[in-house]
């Protein structure tokens, strides 16, 4: 069965501050998608959150970039914003950059990851959702999952994965894309993936069959808006098992937290902490950044699940390590590399302060 899985997300208001989502906002989103499913637009849906980001997970048969599906998501975010405004939540409507829907939510603020595929006998899906970080945060885990045999033993010992995967990488500033084959071109590819502020993995394909394996949201809110709005708080869908990595291979990179940009005022480096959905409430210095993982089996488009995959004591040590990394970085206060370099900061007083002090600067 040909199916489209769409994950469309937005921050429509935080409760309290930017730390979490209000139940009334979530309830409104559920009602909207329930109604759309009743009318036959969706096969199934699941509404969830990561911190202050509202996540609409939808299955349907309208393909990627469907105007009907995007309009449903946009209208849902608008109605949820109205609920957020009535409760005077923080940053109500934060990610809705346009006044009215114009055919596709891309470029309008919400993040999207969509894939169309034909459902397998057993279709296992993992959806990652992050808060307090930027698109590009998936580069390191996607590399490990699909190209690193020390993470994914299937690359070595499973004959249907042994030929490797193809990575589609986007230059988010110049709006260009390029594909790399792994393992043959990993050294060339890592030159780019190692700079996640500029180059982000958009999709991964099974090399032999060309089938879609993963897709991520690569929207950069600050580049779209030309100013600081909030972080991208990206999502990523990965197909699992069979010719794709096993669930455990997909989760394994998060057992050793990596450092991403985001955290307080979107202007700091911090560890990405894997947590259960109920623990995705970034409070300490508005963080540290969080990632949740929802696992589903698809049955004729029905979302069987989710299993809250990081709700597992095996990730306790990663959370502990992330807290130690957070302590270590916080000690640096306003100094780089905890604080982002000037050109990467989402907002800064540098121009004002420099202007005020300009007369006091003397030639050396
Ligand atoms: P506000 O202006 O939205 O309060 O921005 C600061 C902030 O919320 C950082 O947490
Ligand atoms: P969000 O992008 O999650 O809204 O966070 C904004 C922020 O400034 C946190 O300090
Ligand atoms: Mg927010
Ligand atoms: Mg957020």
Image (cartoon, helix red, strand yellow):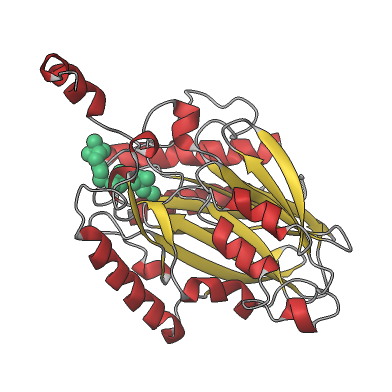
Asked whether, in this view, residue 70 is left or right of residue 313, the answer is right
Query: Quarter holding the C terminus?
Result: top left
Q: Residue furthest front?
A: 364
Q: Residue furthest top?
A: 359
Asked whether residue 132 appears in the rendered view, the answer is: no
Asked whether, in this view, residue 218 is left or right of residue 289, the answer is right
User: Who's the residue at 15% across and 20% down the image?
Assistant: 361
Query: Quarter holding the N terminus?
Result: bottom right
Check the image and report above or below for 24 versus 79.
below
Relative depth, front residue between 128 and 270: 270
Q: Quadrant of residue 330?
A: bottom left
Asked whether residue 62 appears in the rendered view, the answer is: yes
Q: Quadrant of residue 282?
A: bottom left
Check the image and report above or below for 16 versus 102.
below
Check the image and report above or below for 70 versus 168.
above
- x then y, percent, for residue 281: 32, 61
User: Who's the residue at 75% across and 52% down the image?
Assistant: 180
- x then y, percent, for residue 313: 42, 85
Q: Residue furthest right?
A: 209
- x then y, percent, for residue 280: 37, 64
User: Who's the residue at 65% across and 28% down the image?
Assistant: 103
Relative depth, front residue between 107 and 85: 107
Q: Quadrant of residue 289?
A: bottom left
User: Who's the residue at 31% across and 38% down the image?
Assistant: 91
- x then y, percent, for residue 357: 13, 20
Q: How many numbered dots are placed on residues in this image? A: 0
């Amino acid at each position: 069965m040909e199916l489209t899985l769409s994950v469309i997300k937005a921050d429509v208001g935080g409760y309290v501050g930017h730390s979490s989502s209000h139940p009334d906002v979530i309830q409104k989103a559920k009602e909207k998608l329930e109604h759309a499913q009743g009318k036959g637009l969706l096969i199934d849906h699941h509404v969830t959150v990561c911190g202050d980001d509202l996540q609409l997970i939808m299955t349907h048969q309208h393909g990627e970039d469907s105007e009907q599906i995007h309009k449903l998501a946009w209208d849902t975010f608008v109605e949820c914003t109205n609920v957020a405004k009535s409760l005077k939540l923080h940053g109500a409507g934060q990610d809705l950059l346009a006044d009215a829907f114009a055919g596709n939510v891309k470029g309008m603020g919400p993040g999207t990851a969509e894939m169309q595929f034909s459902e397998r006998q057993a279709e296992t899906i993992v959806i990652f959702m992050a808060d307090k970080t930027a698109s590009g945060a998936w580069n390191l885990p996607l590399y490990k999952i699909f190209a690193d045999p020390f993470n994914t033993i299937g690359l070595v010992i499973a004959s249907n994965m042994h030929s490797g995967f193809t990575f589609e990488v986007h230059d988010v500033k110049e709006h260009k894309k390029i594909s790399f084959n792994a393992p043959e071109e990993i050294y060339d590819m890592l030159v780019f993936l190692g700079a996640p502020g500029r180059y982000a993995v958009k999709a991964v394909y099974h090399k032999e069959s060309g089938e879609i394996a993963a897709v991520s949201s690569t929207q950069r809110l600050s580049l779209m808006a030309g100013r600081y709005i909030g972080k991208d708080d990206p999502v990523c869908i990965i197909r699992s098992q069979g010719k794709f990595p096993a669930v455990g291979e997909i989760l394994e990179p998060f057992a050793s937290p990596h450092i991403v940009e985001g955290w307080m005022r979107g202007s700091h480096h911090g560890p990405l902490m894997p947590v259960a959905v109920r623990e995705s409430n970034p409070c300490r210095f508005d963080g540290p950044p969080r990632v949740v993982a929802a696992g589903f089996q698809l049955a004729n488009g029905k979302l069987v699940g989710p299993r809250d995959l990081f709700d597992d004591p095996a990730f306790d040590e990663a959370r502990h390590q992330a807290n130690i990394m957070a302590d270590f970085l916080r000690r640096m206060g306003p100094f780089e590399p905890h604080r982002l370099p000037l050109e990467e900061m989402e907002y800064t007083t540098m121009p004002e302060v420099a202007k005020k002090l300009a007369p006091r600067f003397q030639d050396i």
